[in-house]
Amino acid sequence: MSNVNEGTIERLVTGTRALGALAIDPALLAETGDTVSRAAFAMAMNVLLFDDLLRRVPSGAAYVAETVARGARITFDHGALRTIRFREGPTGALPAGQDAFQRILEPLGYRVADTYPLPALRMTGRAYCHLDAPEAIPQFFVSELHVERFDEGFVRTAERVFGTTRDPLNADAQDVLAAFAAGGSVPYADAVVALPAIVACFDCHHDPVTLGDYEALLARSGEAAWIATEGNAFNHATDRVADVDALAAWLKAEGRPMKDTVEVSSSGRVRQTAFRADSFERRFAGGVRRTVPGSFYEFITRDADPASGSLDLRFDSGNATGIFAMTRAA
């Protein structure tokens, strides 16, 4: 049994290797007691999602292990996930597109900070920033692919594939989210039960895709094909570093599978690059197996916004479009 005098986040994620790898705000780690704030719960959720990403991305896990071995820690800037929005109605049993995750993030203190059109990908991205500790609690970049922007053949294939999506958010988790929305904190006993159910939403919950349907999606949208095999799992997790250009040069010299260039925002204050996505063998309907791109690990440098003096926490449509290519280049 966990000790009520231990830190709340540590109690919620006990035994998780990512906890020791991440640089977490001391004020968040200091929370104790028999209730859990939305900020502590959100940070614990992010620790578990980062841990899941490392289990699925060997290149990222190796980098994190080497960083920790040098005595440093990872500043988790944001996680990204992809969703599907049909022309109308839900996505299977899930609320449509990004709505499936808005219902989780908003009760935990997140709000949409900005919306980013991604016309080249026929997608829209939304940045969710935490109200209580915007620089300390990782953001979410939630994108949705607009199925209706493709031809009718693509629409029918997407509806066949993603129309089978199940909703993993159980009644207990929904009750806890409602309690967070109403009061900003919940009893620890409720939080510890709800946390795994909420984290489980960031996964693949539709039936296995046939190879034919996968290839039909891939021919028109690498992003749709990626969602067909990986679902709503973290597409990438991002490490906030002091100098992404210098780090990228060093990692390239080390022979790491890096993106060719660093993406620079229109403001010049946000610079991003990434490892190329690791590849995995996935099982398709009927037992067919094929190697496909999985998730990846990203790096970002954020300079201060001179207007506020705070870190520029914004994203950039051009940067996002370039980073998304990492799963196509695997």
Image: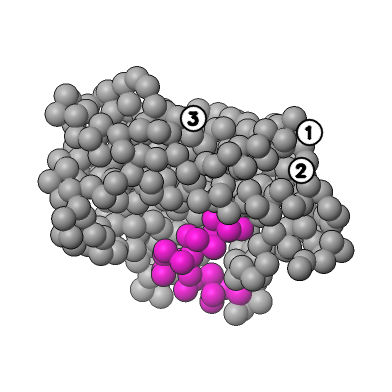
> Could you tell me which secondary element the residue under label 3 belongs to?
helix
Asked whether, in this view, residue 214 is left or right of residue 35, the answer is left
What residue is disc 2 on?
A: 186
Is the residue 73 above or below the residue 138 in the image? below
Residue 85 in percent (x, y) is at 36, 29
Query: Which circle's residue, 1 or 3, is located before the other in the chain?
Result: 3
- Kindly check if marks 3 and 2 are in contact, taking CB atoms under 8 A apart as contact: no
Residue for point 61% across, 68% down: 16
Q: Which residues are magenta?
A: 47-68
Specify whether residue 48 is painted magenta. Answer: yes
Residue 203 in percent (x, y) is at 43, 50
Q: The disc labelled 1 sits on which kind of residue?
A: Gly
- Kindly check if marks 1 and 3 are in contact, taking CB atoms under 8 A apart as contact: no
What residue is disc 3 on?
A: 99
Q: Which label number is shown at residue 193?
A: none
Q: Which label number is shown at residue 183?
A: 1
Q: The disc labelled 3 sits on which kind of residue?
A: Asp
Q: The disc labelled 2 sits on which kind of residue?
A: Val
Asked whether, in this view, residue 40 is left or right of residue 196, the answer is right
